[in-house]
Structure formats: structure tokens, C-alpha cells
Image (cartoon, grey):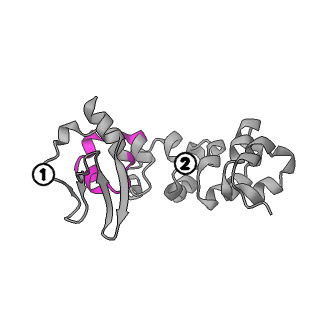
């Protein structure tokens, strides 16, 4: 538990050389300046792999330790599309549907995804896919779609479906 807490308390700080991931004591957990490898003092067995699969800067570690990786977490990572292009059998379609960099995979595999889940995807192309399939959206999907900044045009064209409570809560350019 101690290590999970340490990993969950990681602070992400940007600097000129790239992203450094520091623990609570300020020690760098990953060394991005030197061939993107774990630092020598890190006990790899204590890393919490599900968090690493989500980390877009840990592709080097994911590729090296592929046998330990959780596909669901990996589907959320925007920088591993090359892995899925080479290994499409690894894709969990329920999880990759909201990955903004997976839009090309989603377009090729419309029959494998739940189009209604595209509301969360922050790629404008996902909203275009929804525009062609508005009949698949439930009231809950329309409510959720109100959270997506790229859905303004779609919502304007379906004014009766707007959830005004949700729309009032978020920062949309509606002027």
C-alpha cells in the first residue's frame, strides 16, 4: 500500500527537458533525459503497472514489459497506437473508444464500438462520426454529449436534446 500511495501522489512537472515525475520526496521516478529508462534506484517490482499503462510518457517501459501490461489501461494511452496497429487483437473496444488518437482505428472498426460512447472522445472527428449516427443516442448519451466542447454544432442542430443543466456547468463557447 505504501508504494501505491507514493505512485498515486506523484506530481507531474514540466521543465525545459521534458516531463519529470517526482515522488513526494522530490526524487525523479523516471529518467527521460537518458534514453527513457527507469532510474537505477527504483525497484521495478514495486511499480503499480495499471498506472504506468495510462502514462503517455512511459511507452518505452510498456514496450519493454509488454507481458505485464493491462490492455484496458493501455487503451487509454494516446501514445501507443502503433502497438494496436500491429496487434489489433489487444484492443478493448469499450476502453479505446474515448482515446483521441485512436480515431483512425475507430473509423475502420465501427462495427466493434458502441458509437454512443464517442461522446467522451475529445477528437473533433469523433463528433463527426456521431453526427452520422444520432439515432443511436439515448437521452443519457445526449446529456453526456453536452460535456464535450467539440459537440456545440451537433447540439445546435439537435436543440431539443440539449441538457441545459449540464450545459450551464461547463465552459462552452456558445456566444
Give whichever of 6, 153 is nearer the camera. Answer: 6
User: Which residue: 40% across, 58% down?
Assistant: 79
- For label 1, the residue is 40
Residue 47 shown left or right of residue 77 in the figure: left
For residue 171, which quarter of the picture? bottom right
| Quadrant of the drawing holding the C terminus | bottom right
Give whichever of 104, 12 is nearer the camera. Answer: 12
Residue 24 sits above or below residue 150 on the image: above
Q: Position of residue 95 (x, y in %)?
A: 50, 42
Give whichever of 115, 18 is nearer the camera. Answer: 18
- For label 2, the residue is 98
The residues tagged by marks 1 and 2 sit, at their Cα atoms, a distance apart of 35 Å
* Local SS, label 1: loop
User: Which residue: 30% across, 34% down?
Assistant: 4
Residue 134 shown left or right of residue 37 in the figure: right
**Sequence-first disc among 1 and 2:** 1
Q: Position of residue 36 (x, y in %)?
A: 23, 60
* Residue range of the region highlighted in magenta in the rendering: 54-72
Amino acid at each position: 500500500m505504501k508504494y501505491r500511495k507514493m505512485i498515486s501522489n506523484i506530481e507531474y512537472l514540466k521543465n525545459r527537458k521534458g516531463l519529470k515525475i517526482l515522488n513526494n520526496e522530490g526524487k525523479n521516478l523516471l529518467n527521460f533525459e537518458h534514453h527513457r529508462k527507469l532510474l537505477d534506484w527504483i525497484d521495478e517490482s514495486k511499480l503499480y503497472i495499471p498506472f504506468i499503462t495510462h502514462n503517455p510518457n512511459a511507452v518505452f517501459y510498456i514496450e519493454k514489459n509488454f507481458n505485464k501490461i493491462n490492455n484496458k489501461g493501455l487503451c487509454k494511452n494516446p501514445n501507443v497506437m502503433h502497438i494496436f496497429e500491429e496487434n489489433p487483437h489487444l484492443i478493448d473496444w469499450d476502453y479505446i473508444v474515448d482515446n483521441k488518437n485512436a480515431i483512425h482505428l475507430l473509423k475502420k472498426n465501427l462495427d466493434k464500438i458502441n458509437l454512443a460512447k464517442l461522446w467522451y472522445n475529445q477528437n473533433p472527428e469523433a463528433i463527426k462520426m456521431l453526427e452520422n449516427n444520432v439515432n443511436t443516442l439515448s437521452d443519457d448519451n445526449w446529456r453526456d454529449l453536452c460535456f464535450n466542447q467539440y459537440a456545440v454544432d451537433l447540439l445546435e442542430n439537435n436543440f431539443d436534446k440539449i441538457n441545459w443543466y449540464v450545459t450551464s456547468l461547463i465552459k462552452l463557447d456558445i456566444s
